[in-house]
Amino acid sequence: MVAIAERISPQEYLALERKSETKHEYINGRMVEMTGASRKRNLIVGNLVYILMSQLRGRGGLSKRYAYPRTRDWLVYVS
């Protein structure tokens, strides 16, 4: 993984990420290049999709056109 040395704001990160051909994580104010998908990442994504689908089913949201969670290109804020 490659990290950008200088600290940037979350807004700067999002602007740079939109233009970038590779994906990055934003960790403690720094952009870190992401590696390919891992087993751990796939498990996390699968669990998130399951939780979202369960919530949508419980609210009748699955009948709506855009109520399906996507499994790619998520930006998730964790504090």
Image (cartoon, grey):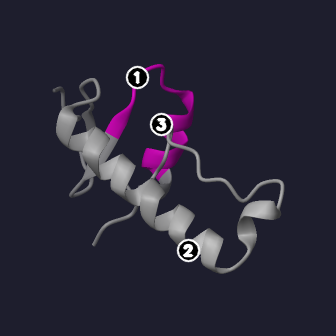
Q: What kind of secondary structure does the magenta stretch mostly adopt?
A: helix
Q: Earlier in the sequence, mark 2 or mark 3?
A: 3
Determine if the magenta segment contains residue 63: no
Determine if the magenta segment contains residue 18: yes
Which of the two residues, 61 or 18, is positioned nearer the viewer here? 61
Q: Secondary structure at mark 3?
A: helix
- At a point 44% along the width and 59% down the height, the residue shown is 50
Q: Do we see residue 19 in this rendering? A: yes
Left or right relative to 53: residue 39: left
Which of the two residues, 6 or 14, is positioned nearer the viewer here? 14
Q: Position of residue 13 (x, y in %)?
A: 43, 46
Q: Amino acid at mark 2?
A: Gln
* The disc label shown at residue 22, or none: 1
Q: Secondary structure at mark 1?
A: loop
* Residue neighbourhood size for the residue with mark 3, other residues' Cα within 10 Å, grouped as few (<14), some (14–19), many (≥20): some
Left or right relative to 79: residue 18: right
Q: Which residues are magenta?
A: 12-24
**Residue under pointer 3:** 17
Task: Evaluate if marks 3 and 1 touch, with contact meaning CB atoms under 8 Å apart.
Answer: no
